[in-house]
Image (spheres, rainbow, N blue to C red):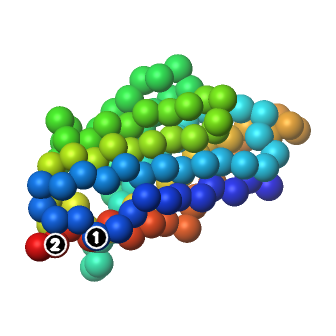
Amino acid sequence: QVQLVESGGGLVQPGGSLRLSCVASGSIFSINAMDWYRQAPGKQRELVATITSGGSTNYVDSVKGRFTISGDNAKNTVYLQMNSLKPEDTAVYYCNAEVTNWSRSTRRYWGRGTQVTVSS
């Protein structure tokens, strides 16, 4: 089994910054990619940012230039630095990882999410 635990969410004023972290633990042979998703009330979950094990990144257009995804392979951790936050960034942010375990089986796992609220 693999567990993903997010942290770093909270309440921030518009224009402020937050840094989210997600740590993966358990039966991990390799992590192929880690993603951040978010889900606002009444909306579908959307992919915000992706990073592969090779360091390639991709972002949804609405956060480009404001959010930065990074990873620490040695710590099985992914970060999301969020700057210039807007009220529309308010959502529960979820970590997702594609993991190959020691039996060489690959599947995706979800964390439980961390709330980000942008409000004055």
- Which residue is the extreme one toward the top? 54
What amino acid type is highlighted by mark number 1?
A: Leu
Residue 112 at x, y percent in the picture: 55, 67
Q: Determine crowd level at label 1: few under 14, some 14-19, many 20+ residues with C-alpha closer than 10 A.
A: some
Note whether 56 is above or below 6 in the view shown: above
Q: Determine crowd level at label 2: few under 14, some 14-19, many 20+ residues with C-alpha closer than 10 A.
A: some
Q: Nearer the viewer, residue 21 or 65?
A: 21
Can residue 105 be spotted in the picture? no
Which residue is denoted by mark 1 in the rendering?
Answer: 11
**Numbered mark located on residue 87 in the image:** none
Residue drawn at 64 percent across, 38 percent down: 76
Q: Nearer the viewer, residue 66 or 46?
A: 66
- Residue 40 position by quadrant: bottom left
- Counting residues from the N terminus, which is met first, the one under dot 1 or under dot 2? 1
Which residue is denoted by mark 2 in the rendering?
Answer: 119
Note whether 84 is above or below 73 in the view shown: below
Residue drawn at 77 percent across, 40 percent down: 28
**On the rendered structure, is 75 left or right of 86?**
right
- Residue 117 position by quadrant: bottom left
What amino acid type is highlighted by mark number 2?
A: Ser
Q: Are marks 1 and 2 in contact (CB under 8 Å)?
A: yes
Residue drawn at 49 percent across, 50 percent down: 21
**On the rendered structure, is 60 left or right of 88?**
right
Residue 54 at x, y percent in the picture: 52, 20
**On the rendered structure, is 113 left or right of 88?**
right
Residue 59 at x, y percent in the picture: 29, 38
Judged from the image, the secondary structure of the residue bearing numbered disc 1 is: strand
